[in-house]
Image: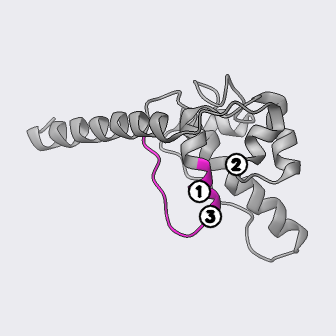
Amino acid sequence: MSLLHKAMMLLTIARARGFAARAAVRAPTTRLMSAAAWEALGLNSDMSDLVSKQWPEPNAVQRAALPALLKQEDDAVVGAETGSGKTLAYLLPAAQRAVANRRKHTPYPAALVLVPNRELGTQLRRGGGGRRGGGKRGG
């Protein structure tokens, strides 16, 4: 592995750790119960009810990322360590938009999900469930 490649990997890891730390600081500390916690971040009531059955409340990364991801104004990058709940944070806005577009009967695909490796693709195909919106089965 080249020196440049190692340096880029270290920079990426440092940025991810920095984002996770900032997300934890910026995340709301109010602990709402169940679906209300998800709805407070911008998910609609149907999606909040559904998600809260598996994950009672969002974690710090999701609380920091979801409001921005739901705005759909720009591309977004969420950097945090493995198992932090990034995948769920990305998928919830996509799922909410897909359901809304399906009701409108648009001719476009509901969503396109690209993943960096086969393991994550397999996990998502199985349903993306997991522990607290993170970990090996949802993060």
The number of numbered discs placed on residues in the rendered structure image is 3
User: Looking at this view, is 47 or 118 the one in front?
Assistant: 47
- Callout 3: few (<14), some (14-19), or many (20+) C-alpha neighbours within 10 Å? few
- Callout 2: few (<14), some (14-19), or many (20+) C-alpha neighbours within 10 Å? some
Residue on which the image places disc 2: 92
Q: Which residues are magenta?
A: 66-79
Separation of disc 2 and disc 3 at Cα?
12 Å
User: Looking at this view, is 92 or 68 the one in front?
Assistant: 68
Label placed on residue 115: none
Query: Residue at position x 59%, y 56% from top?
Result: 69
Mark 1 and mark 3 in contact? Answer it, CB < 8 Å. Answer: yes
The answer to whether 94 appears left or right of 84 in the picture is right
Q: Please state the horizontal and vertical placement of residue 60, each as a whole percent of the image.
A: 56, 33
Q: Quadrant of the N terminus?
A: top left
Say what amino acid the circle numbered 1 marks: Leu
- Callout 1: few (<14), some (14-19), or many (20+) C-alpha neighbours within 10 Å? many
Query: Residue at position x 66%, y 48% from top?
Result: 91
Separation of disc 1 and disc 2 at Cα?
9 Å
Residue on which the image places disc 1: 69
Separation of disc 1 and disc 3 at Cα?
5 Å
Q: How is the image coloured?
A: one colour
User: Looking at this view, is 75 or 42 the one in front?
Assistant: 42
